[in-house]
């Protein structure tokens, strides 16, 4: 059997049930070993090491199509059954001084169901077919899926009669400590052999086997079937042709077909059974072994009687025969009367039977053709719906792509518009900034022009005043030196001062260094003949003014750091100079506005 195509068929199911890639690789390796060795027992033991919890038991059925025909029945006996299959009802009645004879473990608090962990040999539970590894689904009609262990014990202990609904899982939960995670253990040991497989504590199920038959490329099973009467209903295998596919799958005469592809055959009509068997190339069958042998033995016995014996027996006194409501249908060239009574067939009866058989076969063929036609129509409808669904999905995808494209174009337009607006805002802000700077610059220029004009006007005014004073001084010097007559300026006789005027006005910044004062001396003021002017009378060597070198003796001080020294007393002028010097830190500059003197500093001016 080519296993590669079957791998593809069940690969998705394996990926769903086994999430570990390493475990999946081990599973495929076990299947490859089986294809080489044909050792089905080793395969099942390998699978049990991988399939270690009930949720994975479905894999055993998924693997069934990959098992060789001659191993199908043996594999079914070895492999555990999937959960939820073949539910059984166990009724137990407590006797005096006797327990039911079984123990359970698990419960909702552990995240698992209730499982039978032990069955006492020879006990009532053992005789009734309760098995270790059974999961209890109901107790006396009550569902116990969400029941804790203690609640289940109370349901069982508190009654003398109990009815259990169970399904065989073949595994029991294991938990050594309360903090340990739940693990699972098979009820049988890994070294299972054929003799152990044949034992069962459930007589009603021991002869049931499940097989998968692949009819692709085969003309048929090579078997004939027969329908039983009402008192022995069912579909039974009557013959198995040597060398046929049915023989490869170990089908035998007398086997009862219980189920095909999920459909029960226990009460099915003969024609429906034929349609089901011929209507599919893949058959999942449940077979009950050898239960139809008594029926077929009776048939063979009746057919083996000679006509003479049958005539002789007809002369005997007739015996009452049981009446059957439905004697069943006839197939495979067998008459129903041959199964249940000894009759003498005549030629016309044989012809009638042959005609009836032909009609029945034609009817079955027609029904089969109708079934095939219905399947074909259903397949075409499915393909058409699938095509329409794909076209609808493609149309939806196309619409989504168009909408997405439109959305992207709109988004690009929006971004471009936002960028344009942002650039315009930036341009406006830049233009506004430049306009503000231009206005500030214009204001600064106007203020600078006004300041210069004010300085120019002040300079001219000071020059005029200085010239007047110089004229007055020169006028005083032209008179007799010992004259006691008051001068034009009213200076006392003998008073001397150094005074200059009439020069240009300038601004000088004197840097005040640490521990270096200005070191100048001033004279004049409102209480002097200088008419309120403050004039430098001495520049001491080594001082800040001397180091600067731009202010000389005889220069008139107009302003110091913006403070005017015009028309104030000498005391006030000294006070302002002292305050400015105190407020100035080392390294700072003191700004002087002075009018240069045009007198020779070696001359002495004497006021009379």
Image (cartoon, helix red, strand yellow):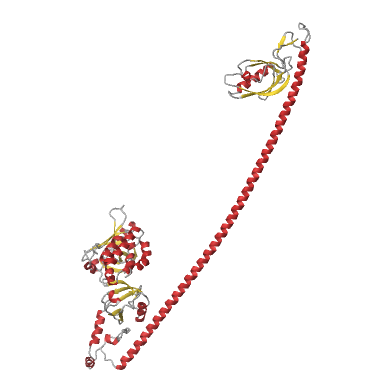
Residue at x-position 50% and y-position 66%: 393
Q: Which of 279/163 is in front?
A: 279
Rendered location of residue 59, percent (x, y): 33, 65
Q: Which quadrant would residue 430 be assigned to in this image?
A: top right
Residue 63 appears in the picture as rendered: yes
Q: Which of 49/457 is in front?
A: 457
Residue 502 sits above or below residue 72 on the image: above
Rendered location of residue 70, percent (x, y): 27, 72
Identity of the residue furthest to the top in this view = 482
Residue 321 sits above or below residue 441 on the image: below
Residue 487 appears in the picture as rendered: no
Q: Which quadrant would residue 136 be assigned to in this image?
A: bottom left
Q: Quadrant of the N terminus?
A: bottom left
Q: Which quadrant would residue 55 be assigned to in this image?
A: bottom left
Q: Which of 103/549 is in front?
A: 549
Residue 222 sits above or below residue 447 on the image: below
Rendered location of residue 266, percent (x, y): 32, 77
Q: Quadrant of the C terminus?
A: top right
Residue at x-position 76% and y-position 13%: 473
Residue 455 sits above or below residue 108 on the image: above
Q: How many marks?
A: 0
């Amino acid at each position: 059997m080519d296993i590669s195509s079957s791998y593809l068929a069940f690969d998705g199911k394996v990926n769903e049930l086994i999430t570990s890639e390493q475990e999946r690789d081990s599973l495929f390796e076990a299947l490859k070993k089986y294809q080489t060795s044909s050792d089905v027992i080793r395969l099942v033991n390998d699978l049990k090491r991988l399939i270690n919890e009930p949720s994975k038991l479905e894999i055993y059925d998924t693997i069934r199509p990959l098992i060789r025909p001659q191993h199908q029945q043996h594999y079914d006996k070895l492999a555990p059954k999937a959960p939820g299959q073949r539910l059984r009802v166990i009724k137990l009645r407590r006797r005096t001084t006797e327990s039911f004879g079984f123990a359970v473990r698990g419960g909702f608090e552990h995240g698992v169901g209730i499982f039978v962990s032990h069955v006492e040999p020879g006990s009532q539970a053992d005789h009734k077919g309760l098995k270790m590894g059974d999961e209890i689904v109901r107790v006396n009609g009550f569902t116990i899926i969400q029941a804790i262990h203690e609640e289940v014990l109370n349901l069982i202990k508190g009654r003398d009669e109990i009815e259990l609904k169970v399904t065989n899982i073949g595994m029991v939960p294991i938990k050594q400590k309360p903090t340990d995670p739940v693990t699972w253990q098979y009820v049988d040991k890994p070294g299972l052999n054929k003799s152990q497989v044949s034992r069962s504590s459930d007589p009603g199920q021991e002869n049931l086997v499940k097989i998968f038959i692949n009819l692709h490329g085969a003309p048929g099973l090579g078997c004939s079937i027969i329908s039983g009467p009402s008192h022995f209903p069912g579909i039974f295998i009557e013959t198995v042709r040597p060398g046929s596919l049915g023989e490869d799958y170990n089908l035998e005469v007398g086997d009862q077909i219980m189920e095909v592809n999920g459909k029960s055959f226990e009460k099915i009509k003969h024609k429906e059974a034929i349609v089901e068997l011929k209507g599919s190339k893949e058959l999942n069958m449940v077979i009950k072994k050898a239960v139809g042998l008594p029926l077929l033995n009776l048939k063979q016995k009746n057919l083996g009687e000679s006509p003479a014996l049958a005539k002789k027996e007809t002369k005997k006194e007739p015996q009452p025969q049981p009446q059957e409501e439905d004697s069943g249908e006839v197939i495979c060239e067998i008459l129903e009367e041959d199964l249940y009574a000894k009759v003498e067939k005549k030629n016309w009866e044989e012809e009638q039977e042959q005609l009836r058989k032909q009609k029945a076969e034609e009817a079955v063929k027609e029904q089969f053709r109708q079934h095939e036609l219905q399947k074909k129509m259903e397949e075409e409808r499915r393909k058409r719906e699938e095509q329409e669904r794909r076209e609808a999905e493609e149309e939806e995808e196309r619409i989504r792509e168009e909408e997405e494209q439109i959305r992207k174009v709109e988004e690009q337009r929006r971004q471009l518009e936002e960028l344009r607006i942002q650039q315009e805002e930036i341009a406006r802000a830049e233009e506004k900034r430049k306009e503000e700077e231009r206005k500030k610059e214009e204001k600064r220029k106007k203020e600078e022009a006004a300041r210069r004009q004010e300085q120019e006007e002040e300079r001219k005014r000071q020059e005029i005043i200085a010239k007047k004073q110089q004229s007055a001084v020169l006028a005083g010097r032209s008179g007799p030196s010992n004259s006691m007559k008051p001068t034009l300026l009213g200076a006392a006789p003998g008073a001397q001062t150094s005074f200059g005027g009439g020069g240009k006005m300038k601004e000088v910044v004197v840097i005040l260094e640490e521990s270096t004062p200005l070191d100048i001396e001033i004279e004049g003021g409102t209480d002097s003949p200088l008419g309120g002017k403050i004039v430098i009378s001495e520049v001491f060597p080594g001082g800040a003014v001397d180091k600067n070198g731009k202010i000389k003796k005889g220069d008139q001080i107009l302003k110091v750091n913006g403070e005017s020294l015009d028309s104030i007393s000498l005391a006030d002028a000294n006070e302002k100079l002292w305050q400015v010097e105190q407020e100035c830190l080392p390294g700072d500059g003191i700004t002087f506005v002075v009018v240069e003197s045009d007198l020779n500093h070696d001359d002495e001016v004497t006021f009379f």
